[in-house]
Every structure is written in structure tokens, then in C-alpha cells.
Amino acid sequence: MEGLLVKKRALLSVSDKSGILEFAKALESLDYEILSTGGTMKHLADNGVAVTAVDEVTGFPEIMEGRVKTLNPFIHGGLLAKRDNPVHQAQMEEHQIHPIDIVCVNLYPFKETISKADVTTEDAIENIDIGGPAMLRASAKNHAYVTVIVDATDYEQVLAELKADGQTTHETRRRLAAKVFRHTAAYDALIAGYLTDLAGEEFPEQVTYTYELKQPLRYGENPHQKAAFYSKPLGSDFSIAYAEQLHGKELSYNNIQDANAAIQIVKEFDAPAAVAVKHMNPCGVGTGETIADAFNKAYEADPVSIFGGIIALNREVDVTTAEKLSGIFLEIVIAPSFTEEAIDVLTKKKNIRLLTISFEQNKQDKWNTVSVEGGLLMQEPDAFGFKDADIRVATDREPTEAEWEAMKLGWAVVKHVKSNAIVVSDNERTLGVGAGQMNRVGAAGIALTQAGERAKGAALASDAFFPMDDTVEAAAKAGITAIIQPGGSVKDEDSIKKANEYGITMVFTGVRHFKH
């Protein structure tokens, strides 16, 4: 590089200023020339760092309100040149392009901008960074020669290697380059998602999601499976991904799955409600005048299965409720908050996890996704509720008020139970749950057996229609007086006839709730 400066250069331009001043001063002490722009340049200069403005290097001022400033051969040539390529060296010599050895860039805060409730489309568009990703991608592509940093947590290692050997290792540069491409891919995924929503595209020809590591997990469903938990940027606060853990050991893979299931069920209720979940199925759901009363009902629903379960409550946990919770072995308790007295009671149990989530923001993801080998399934969440249904009383007898309430509770719960699903309930609690059976009458048998004598005068909810009248027969023999189901079978008349025969009131909703 005869004829060019031999001093190494670092280009620093960050929106996140944490640690950048110390990093710049350390580079300066290692005899790097610091290039910078805008707010970063001012921050460094105001604190005594000698800074060269990028427009001094390019010979061209920032234009178009800063939209164009680093998109220039004097910058990108310095980033992309192969240092051991004679043609590249000759062209750099000819055009007086100086190599840039270190690039430290953060991008415009697009995610933070679109997360604001009052964000305008104009603000969002202006916070789409162009020059930043271009510099990051160029540097990462050329990581054989360039050290590129997008995360302030990497400053320390880079400086340590520079001080020890005068340069970073190839392994470090490759690791940092991979982080850059993950970062820019995630950034572009958010922009693509935002603009796709603006355009009203439901199923675009390509879909890209991005997630952020929340925590590595000790193992997956079983100890021989590795696992980690990722959260969706800008996801709902009303989710396990944004829960705050107050007490207890870290969550496991199965804990997270069960906790998510419990949260989705408790969302269904406005009145004080408690949900107990085991293996992603509800084993007890109760409502009441108080949250303590609701938990009592959930416990009474199935005092055996609740052991080792996950509890979600939609009201603050007070000391009375805490004392009831502490009386049994529970893995997790989720609530909007806990009183100090309740925390004192519950934290006496070393391993119980206490989580809080925001019940204020009941925002739901637009799409649910499920991975299959080699692909991804995407569908709308099942947000269809009782108030949305085209309710029809199919039998001779109209439901009583208590039967209506019992059917509403059962139908709210059954859509969260693995199909084939049957829920037996009264107007305050579930009494029996039949989950994941290969035939409907088998699911009914489990739910009715669990309910026992409590099935007399109770309601039965089914996630899908009855293909024949055997489920109605079983319900009648157990003492069920009300049934809610979608209807739509070619043999509906057989079930209606059987219900009329036993004096059962049966309601059709017109909508099924399969859950696979």
C-alpha cells in the first residue's frame, strides 16, 4: 500500500452509546484513527477523542437529511478490499482509498420506533437504516480482514486481542461476522413484517420471523434433548415470554409449555379465575367471587392431578390465596401480582416458581406457528368465543340460566384441551376433562368418570360434533342435563333425538375447536 497512510482506521457510528467512549479512547491509545458521523462524532469529540468526520474522507457532505453519508467508494472500498489481492491493492492505490480495519455500528432503532403506541408510518420509514446495514454487511463479508462489531458486549474481547497481538483472531472476526448477519437479518425481518402488515398481505410468498434468546434451558422435553427459549420482539406482555420471575429455579422446557397453556386459558375469563394445567391440558378451572374462591374451585375440580401442576390466576395473589397454594406441591404460580405477605408465604417453598405477567395488554399474535420437519404451519389463533357463536338450541328444552353459565364455562375451556376433547362443568368449575382421545365417546368416558356424582345436573362441552348418539347416551346415564357442541354431523338428528329422549338441553355453536 505504498503511497497510502499506514495508520489503522476504525469507523464508529452507534445509536447505542454505552461503552463507546471507552472503546474509542482505547483504540486511540493503540494508534487508530477514529472516523465517525453525527451524534457519535459529537459525543466522542466532546469527550476529548480526536475524530475524523466521514465527509472529510469521502470529500462529500451528508445530504438528504443524512440519508446519504457513508454510501461512498472511499468507505466501502476501504471495507471490501482484499488486503492480499494485487488488483484490489492497485485500485486502492490509484484512487487513494484507505483500508478500514474496525467497524462498530448500531442501526437506527426501528424496533423501538414501531413499538410506540403513537408511531406514524413516516416515523417508521425514517427509522429504516440503509447505510448502517450496508457497512455491517460489507465488513462482515470481508471479515478475513475487517473486525466488525454490532454489540457493545464484544468491545472487551476485541480490545484484549488488539492489545495482546495487535490484531483480532480470524475465529473472533468470523464469530462477529456471523453475529452481524444475524443482526441485520433480524432487523430486515422486522421491517418486512411491518411493511407486509401495512400492505395487508396475509400469506406472502416468503415469510421470515425473528426471535431473541431469552435463556438457554437445562434440557428439552427430556434430559437427552438440548433446548433454548426465544422470545418474539414486540410480542404481547401478556405472555410467558415476557413474564417476570420473582422466585424459584429457572423454568424448564415443559414448564414454559405448560405455563403458556395456563395463560391462554385464564385469558378466557373476566371474573376471578384460576387454572391448573398438567401436560398442556387443564386439570381444573374455577371461577369465584374472589381469587381464593376461584382457586378452591380449581383445586376441587381435580385434587389429584393438580399435584405438581402449573397455576394461572387473573387477580393479585393475596395472603389467603397464598396459604392455600402453599398447601400443595406446585411447579409454578402465575398472576398479575403478589402482595408482600403472599410472597413471604410462598417463598418459604424453595422450588416453587412465582411469575408475574401484565394482564393489561391482552394483545394476541396475529398468527400462530408450529414447526414440522422441513416446514412451518401458520394459522390465526383460535379467538372465537361464545359471544361470537351463532347459538342454536337444537332440542325441545331451553337451558336454564345455570345451564347456560355451565355451558359457557365448559366451552371456554374445551378449546384449550387436546382433541378429542370433552369437558364436564358446572357454572363455577370444571368437573371432568377428557383429553387427547382417539374417539369422542372415549374422551366423554374419561371426563364423566372423573366427574362422578358431580356430573348430575352438570353440562358437557365437546370440541367437535358427535358422529353418533353414543356420547349423548353416556352423558345422560351420568346425569348430564345440558350439552354444548358445534353440530354439523350428518347424524345430528340422532343426537338431538337421544337428548330429547332424556330431557337434555343441547346447544349447537356452529364452530368446532379442534386442538392438535
Image (spheres, rainbow, N blue to C red):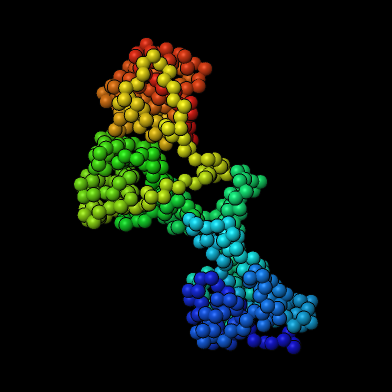
For the question of whether residue 13 can be seen, the reply is yes
Residue, x 32% and y 57% (percent of image)?
A: 246
| Residue 468 relative to residue 206: left or right | left
Q: From what the image shows, is residue 69 above or below residue 389?
A: below
Q: Residue at x 57, y 87 (%)?
A: 50
Rendering coords of residue 356 (x, y %): 34, 53
Q: Quadrant of the N terminus?
A: bottom right
Figure check: 387 above or below 79: above
Which is more toward the observer, 423 or 446? 423
> Which of 129/10 is in front?
129
Residue drawn at 69 percent across, 87 percent down:
5
138 with respect to 416 (left or right): right
Residue 23 can be seen, yes or no: no
Q: Nearer the viewer, residue 118 or 408?
A: 118
Residue 245 in the image: state x and y as whole percent: 35, 56
Q: Give the left or right position of residue 130, taking residue 255 as reference.
A: right
